[in-house]
Image: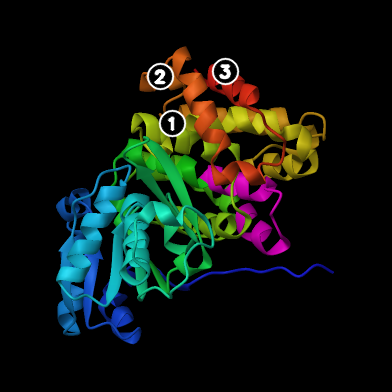
């Protein structure tokens, strides 16, 4: 029997869980925490909730919110300067994937020094990080439980991936109530990002029985709840289920890694500064179609989890049925359907394929993929 490893943080899940932020930081020994967030979270009122929790337990804090949706290396450096200048000893990320990725990257510099790009790749972090508490506010990135941080190199316009078990936060606090302030479009595209995480982790060559359990649950929860979550901000059951889907998909891909969808979306997002969820939503069915021949049995499972009637399902048509269901879901919830909607053109294919081949996520894609394959997928999605 093979030995399997599985890493995850302590998880606090449920409506009202955000009230546990201050106490959670104190349990880790924090005295002055850097809160990493963005202006959207501030406008929605969630930062005030976090500050109130810190006040109740007497925890000092400094807020750093100078972030963009595709976080850049110089934003990480600015955040580290704020951490150092305020003499912080812990980091609290509050927001979507951007805020949480930056929070992790700041933590690297806090104890390891250097430039953030020095840590590109796998296991480049040597010194232990300061305490990390993460509070996601979208059902999307899964970064609150993962060993990933994705940062944009502003010089080369390329997103790079940092992978290390050191990046797994100490505590993840998931409060589904934060999802009730998100627009329908953001709910749709971040939800399809969750589905992408679940599917790519499930067919990854690094998948294990431990990661498969979470990947399968995430796929099923998205299929059963994303439409309802997009339709109504007030559907509490759908929000709770999508928060759980995001959490479980994050646990799955943190341990199984991802595939060609994310390699391509990192390349596109870094070069053209496009929303990660939008790009994933467009690319997912095309990469699924490409990968099907590598793991047909798992695509039978995926199709069933997506809602395909088993009576009409065979190994031969499972990939086609799964793709059809993903495309139907995407259309029904109003997600973008073509890369041309994001103003990409044929001339961008070569740039994307070159960057995607260098992305760490391409390594665990279940089917061997070439530069020409990536260009063809880009053109199909255009």
Disc 2 target residue: 344
The residue lying furthest to the front in this view is 114
Q: How is the image coloured?
A: rainbow
Q: Hey, which residue is sitting farthest right in the picture?
A: 1
Query: Could you tell me which secondary element the residue under label 3 belongs to?
Result: helix
Circle 2: element type: loop
Tags 1 and 3 touching, CB below 8 Å = no
Q: Which label was assigned to residue 268?
A: 1
Return the residue at label 3. 380
Of the pair 277 and 326, the residue shown nearer to us: 277
The spot of residue 93 in percent (x, y) is: 30, 63
- Specify which label sits upstream in the sequence, 3 or 2: 2
Camera-near label (1 vs 3) is: 1
Question: Do labels 2 and 1 touch, CB within 8 Å?
Answer: yes
Rounded to the nearest whole Å, what is the CA distance between mark 3 and mark 2? 12 Å
- The residue depicted at 17 percent of the width and 82 percent of the height is 56
Q: Residue at x 47, y 52 (%)?
A: 120
How far, Cα to Cα, is label 1 from label 3?
15 Å
Secondary structure found at label 1: helix
- Residue 374 at what x, y percent from top left? 59, 26
Residues in magenta, as a range: 195-216
Residue shown at 40% from the left, 29% from the top: 334
Pinpoint residue 272: horizontal percent, then vertical percent.
36, 29
Q: How far, Cα to Cα, is label 2 from label 1?
A: 9 Å
């Amino acid at each position: 029997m093979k030995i399997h490893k599985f890493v995850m943080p302590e998880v606090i899940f449920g409506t009202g869980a955000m009230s546990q932020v201050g106490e959670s930081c104190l349990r880790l020994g924090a005295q002055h925490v850097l809160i990493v967030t963005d202006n959207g979270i501030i406008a929605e009122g969630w930062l005030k909730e976090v500050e109130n929790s810190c006040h109740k337990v007497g925890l000092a804090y400094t807020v750093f919110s100078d972030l963009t949706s595709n976080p850049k290396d110089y934003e990480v450096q600015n955040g580290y300067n704020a951490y150092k200048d305020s003499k912080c000893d812990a980091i609290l990320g509050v927001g979507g994937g951007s805020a949480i990725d930056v929070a992790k990257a700041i933590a690297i510099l806090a104890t390891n020094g250097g430039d953030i790009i020095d840590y590109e790749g796998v296991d480049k972090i040597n010194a232990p990080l300061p305490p990390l508490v993460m509070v996601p506010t979208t059902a999307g990135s899964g970064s609150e439980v993962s060993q990933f941080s994705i940062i944009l190199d502003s010089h080369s316009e390329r997103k790079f991936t940092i992978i290390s078990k050191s990046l797994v936060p100490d505590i993840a606090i998931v409060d589904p109530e934060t999802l009730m302030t998100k627009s329908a479009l953001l709910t749709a595209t971040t939800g399809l990002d969750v589905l992408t995480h679940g599917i790519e982790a499930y067919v990854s060559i690094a998948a294990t029985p431990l990661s498969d359990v979470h990947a399968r649950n995430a796929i099923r929860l998205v299929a059963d709840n994303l439409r309802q979550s997009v339709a109504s901000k007030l559907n509490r059951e759908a929000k709770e289920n999508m928060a759980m889907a995001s959490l479980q998909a994050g646990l799955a891909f943190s341990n199984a890694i991802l595939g060609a969808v994310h390699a391509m979306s990192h390349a596109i997002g870094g070069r053209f500064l496009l929303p990660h969820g939008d790009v994933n939503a467009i690319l997912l069915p095309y990469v699924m179609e490409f990968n099907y021949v590598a793991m047909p049995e798992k695509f039978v499972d995926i199709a069933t989890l997506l809602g395909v009637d088993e009576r009409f399902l065979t190994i031969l048509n499972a990939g086609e049925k799964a793709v059809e269901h993903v495309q139907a879901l995407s259309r029904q919830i109003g997600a973008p359907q073509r890369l041309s909607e994001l103003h990409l053109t044929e001339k961008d294919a070569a740039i994307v394929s070159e960057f995607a081949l260098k992305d760490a996520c391409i390594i665990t894609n279940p089917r061997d993929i070439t530069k020409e394959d990536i260009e063809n997928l880009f053109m199909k999605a255009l």
